[in-house]
Image (tube, helix red, strand yellow):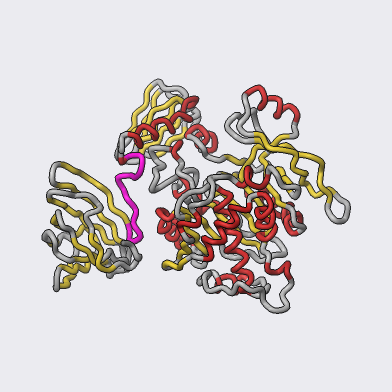
Amino acid sequence: MLIPVVLCGGSGTRLWPVSRQLYPKQFLSLSTKNSMLQETLLRLEGLDTDFDMAAPCVVCHEEHRFLVAEQLRRMGVDAATIVLEPEGRNTAPATALAALQCIEIVRHLGGVKTRENAREITKDPLAISVASPSGADPQDVDPVMLVLPADHHIADEEAFQHAIKQALPLALDGRLVTFGVTPRHAETGYGYIEQGEPLLCADGNKSGAFALQGFTEKPAAEVARQFLEQGRHLWNAGIFMFRAGVFLDELSHLAPDILSWCRQAMAGAERDLDFIRPNAAAFSSNPNISIDHAVMEHTTRGAVVPLDVGWNDIGSWSALWDVSDKNSEGNSISGDVIEVDTHNCMLRSERRLVAAIGLNDIIVVETADAVLVAHRDKVQQVREIVIQLQKNCRVECRQHRRVYRPWGSYMLMEEGERYQVKRITVNPGASLSLQQHHHRAEHWVVVSGTARITCGDKIALITENQSTYIPVGEIHRLENPGLIGLELIEVQSGSYLGEDDIVRLEDTFNRC
């Protein structure tokens, strides 16, 4: 069985102000109408191998769990396993969690590799026997993992699938396969993988893969130019394929502490709705380390498959400009933009008109609460802006004016002393928690749809242009009983308007 494992961590700070801590780039629609997470899974559709492909296993941060679940739901992927990292510990511990979970999934299946059974078991991945099924072939309880970052752009999906099929026999044979991107220029912002001797298939023919000769972290410009001239080095894409058990076996020799802590974390895991919560104390004892540093740089089982697929990690605004559609002046334009005598720029507007005159090689990104203006050669320094925002405790580094919740979203429209105004959207059939506030009162005016309002011991339906009032301290709930979205304007007033002034008495989503 082949199980896609999507690593969905990362904060995407270099794509600020569009990417924020609570809504990072993997959840954004940047180069297509789909989010980067959705594109990561969509490019596997139609992959033709002798193995059935199970529902994906997604490893993400706890704060992003509902974003992941909702984006998968919109794709029709309703059987995924979602493993929640209590905190980020880089790719080696995250992949170890996924490997342990993937083995348990296939053990429960008893080696029967069918999509139907995979969908059934991933609905309840904690109810899994830890013993191998009687008479099962050991190979059948060791699935192949295809480990994918959630935030990369790949232009040639057919070539990508071909590379996956090249790697599969090697992974089945016990190799730890990484994928290296054929470099297009002497890039200093990526790590490099050096190819060794060609690897042969069982029939003696070349496999298209190479032995791993070595890794180099982001090199100096002169070294990068030498790598390009030599033709033996590939950009490190952070994509892997291996059997779960083989990876864990290597981990037991090369980084045994990581395996120990992750085993303890999964042994103490709890089920929360559709999510797997590893034990936080055990998992947080892991070092912060990548797969490369923990395993791939030291293993004797390594292999690398070259990728020439139009890969881009979308690691900066200039990288996004590279893969974006452009007009005859070389400008990538999104939103309400007017440009005059402007060339080779990215001009992105989300809410307001952006007008540009006489610009060359400039990035302009406008959101509801921030505007970024930077030279294309300086966009790596966006991270320094985010660091300053964090030091100053500015909310702009953490969230947008639109904040997503499992029931929908809200947008802050206006705020002042003792008041703020929000536009709230509630998904069909969704419900906010039964709650109360100690410091604020709320007025709700329905813009569209129908709201079911609980206020104290009264329940009422209100529709467009109708309103209601929630006094300070009153127990209340907002629900959308309809089949279309509910939108309303909320006016809050009181001495304290922070989001932490919520006492949840009942909650569908198990939030505190």
What's the residue at 49%, 65% (across, down)? Answer: 268
| Relative side of 307 to 465, left or right | right
What's the residue at 84%, 49% (across, down)? Answer: 200
Instruction: Determine if residue 450 is in view.
Output: no
Task: Tell me residue 442's x, y (percent).
Answer: 15, 56
What's the residue at 32%, 35% (across, down)? Answer: 370
| Relative side of 255 to 83, left or right | right
Of 266 and 302, which appears nearest the observer?
A: 266
Against 428, residue 377 (above or below) is above
Task: Tell me residue 409's x, y (percent).
Answer: 31, 55
| Relative side of 418 to 98, left or right | left
Span of residues in magenta? 396-408
Numbered label tally: 0
Q: Residue furthest right?
A: 204
The quarter of the image holding the C terminus is bottom left
User: Residue 479: which quarter of the image?
Assistant: bottom left
Task: Tell me residue 219's x, y (percent).
Answer: 63, 28
Against 320, residue 178 (above or below) is below
Q: Residue furthest bottom?
A: 134
Is residue 255 magenta-colored? no
The quarter of the image holding the N terminus is bottom right
Of 302 and 410, which appears nearest the observer?
A: 302
Instruction: Determine if residue 249 is in view.
Output: yes
Against 118, residue 402 (above or below) is above
Task: Tell me residue 289's x, y (percent).
Answer: 57, 45
| Relative side of 161 to 276, left or right | right
